[in-house]
Amino acid sequence: MDSTQQALADAYRDVLADLPQHWLDCSRSHEGEYAKLSGLFLPGTSLGFHCAPQRILLVGRETRGWSVLKGDDKFENLETYICKAMAKQQDHLSKFISEPKDRGESFFNLLRDLANDHGTQGIAWANLFSFAWNKKSPMRWKHFAKLLEISEQLLKVQISILQPDIIVFANGASSAKYRQGYFPHKGKSSVCSELSDFSKQRIPINQLWRFKLHQRIQCFRIQHPSSISIPSRAARRFLLEQLRVGVAGGVRSIRSPG
């Protein structure tokens, strides 16, 4: 495990130290409230990520099984589970990012477009929520408040360690308030600056918005990449072009982004 992967694993361990173990070891999966809980989403990164000329982190809300433990696999300890989870997610990304594009619109198609433009080594993937429930969003799960707390901490350590140049938040409108909770853009707790939109380019603010995180990381917010509406598709194409040309200027400062 290289130094970046090790730093991620160590940080994940610290965050997860107080997580109820039965969320991971499936020992209470026979109980209704835990029966549909996925394995933990813990992304790693490519070996060449820090050497990539443009490091881009795509934050989604993909809901899959994330079965870290399969069949007769037993939970050994937290460290081993973390390593298995990181390897699973990175293998998944490496496999799907190199495959032909899906029909229509999808999260992985956006990942593939970014990889085609900027190289696979510089692309990392994170999720707004670290677990799925019933293979869908966990927002209706009984223990969502605890899940949200853990998810926020995990995403923040990923950003701190990976130090991406660009973050694209592509988790959709229904979960926007949780992203804003992680990274406030108003009041004394705000960590966002240079709030801007592309309305002059006829891209509605609800489709694309940008800001600086911690005064350093250029961030964009778009609708979920599976959205098939004409404005959503246009905003994605516009964003990809902006990233190709080095995030061109020409934006307008605003007060109330989404």
Image (cartoon, rainbow, N blue to C red):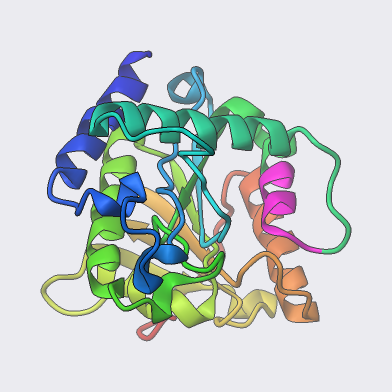
In-image side of 205 versus 161 (left or right): right
The C terminus: image quadrant: bottom left
186 shown above or below 159: below
In front of the other: 71 or 179: 71
Farthest-out residue, bottom: 256
In front of the other: 24 or 116: 24
| Res 216 visible | no
Q: Residue at x 53, y 26 (%)?
A: 53
Q: Quadrant of residue 136?
A: bottom right
x, y percent for residue 114: 67, 43
Does the segment drawn in magenta span residue 123? no
Farthest-out residue, top: 2
The secondary structure making up most of the magenta span is: helix
Q: Give the range drawn in magenta.
A: 105-113
201 shown above or below 218: below
Q: Quadrant of residue 244?
A: top right
